[in-house]
Amino acid sequence: MDTIATNLAEAPDIDRGFIRVRNARKIYAAGDKSVEALSEVNFDVARGEFVAILGPSGCGKSTLLMMCAGLEEATSGTVEVAGSTVTGPHPSIGIMFQDPTLLPWKTVLQNVMFPAHILGQPDSEYRDRAHKLIDMVGLHGFETKRPHELSGGMRQRVAICRALLKDPDILLMDEPFSALDAITRDEMNEVLLDIWHSYAKTALFVTHSIREAVLLADRVLVMTRRPATVVADIRVPFGRPRDMSVIETPEFAKLCAQLRGMIEHGTGKSARRPGDGPVLQPGRHGGEE
Ligand code: ADP
């Protein structure tokens, strides 16, 4: 972390605000009614930073991520990537969702290569990179398998490779591991920590798991219930390369308890003391909170 903080102090403005969200508001029209998902959201993500967006279900986390991806328009306010206002999908952004959305009739390799294939780019340009990514996530030997022959965790590994195929500057992830069982989820968190060590992209990672946010991120943004805003921006004090052993440290438990208090009270201040018992509802899938 210290290295990132030092680099940021010297970084040009565009790198410090590689993703820049300003006064972003989102109101959905839903029949006669409207739903205000986001009220006023402001934050920056520096180039190379991994930022987790943490908040209760339904508070607007996915909406915010989709606005950064150019797949959802802000009702007011702006989202900028690398100094340009986002007006639609951006080629330098890779996305992962909870559902890996693989094409069932295509093999692992063909699914990983799909972003190049759909743009009519020659396979030869991306085949080596696809194989490297497949090896990196531990799927060597599964290149010719089809999605139905893979476990849930393996399918998400394929989705990570596909998202990274075109070497995007930014990786946006919307609860990518929340449908997996607890053990597989831990394995995927480890895979992502390893990837970060070798690739160091800029990342926005939406989750409702406090533990996952603290394990993976350099910063955690805490959102309130709907209409959501960012009430806290917390720097995670663990350096990189990082592994699962940080979970065992008292600092990890203390930070999780602090974040839990913030979410419970919907403020940037924790009314609870570190070490107090859990207060969140169990997570949707596995409830490790
Ligand atoms: P989260 O990701 O935090 O669970 P979402 O961003 O998915 O939350 O949703 C925030 C709120 O906006 C929810 O109340 C949801 O019902 C509403 N919402 C999301 N998408 C739409 C849509 N296309 N039309 C109307 N309401 C929507």
Image (cartoon, rainbow, N blue to C red):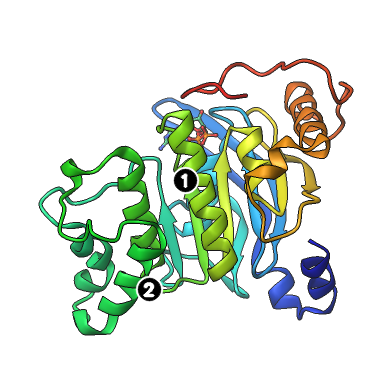
- Point out the residue furthest to the left here: 105
Q: Are marks 2 and 1 in contact (CB under 8 Å)?
A: no
x, y percent for residue 179: 40, 32
Mark carried by residue 166 = 2
x, y percent for residue 74: 54, 51
x, y percent for residue 281: 61, 16
Mark carried by residue 188 = 1
Quadrant location of the N terminus in the rendered image:
bottom right
Does the numbered disc 1 mark a residue whose Cβ is under 8 Å from ligand 1? no
Residue shown at 83% from the left, 79% from the top:
10
Q: Is residue 26 left or right of residue 230?
A: left
- The answer to whether 143 is drawn above or below residue 177 in the figure is below
**Of 76 and 40, the residue lying toward us:** 40
Q: Amino acid at mark 1?
A: Met
Q: Label 1 crowding class (10 Å Cα cut-off): few <14, some 14-19, many 20+? A: many
**Of 187 and 208, the residue lying toward us:** 187
**Of 46 and 3, the residue lying toward us:** 3
Quadrant location of the C terminus in the rendered image:
top right
Q: Quadrant of residue 108?
A: bottom left
Residue shown at 83% from the left, 17% from the top:
276
Q: Label 2 crowding class (10 Å Cα cut-off): few <14, some 14-19, many 20+? A: some
Element on which disc 2 rests: loop
Element on which disc 1 rests: helix
x, y percent for residue 215: 65, 44
Q: Is residue 140 left or right of residue 174?
A: left
Q: Quadrant of residue 224?
A: top right
- The answer to whether 47 is drawn above or below residue 195 in the figure is below
Mark carried by residue 56 = none
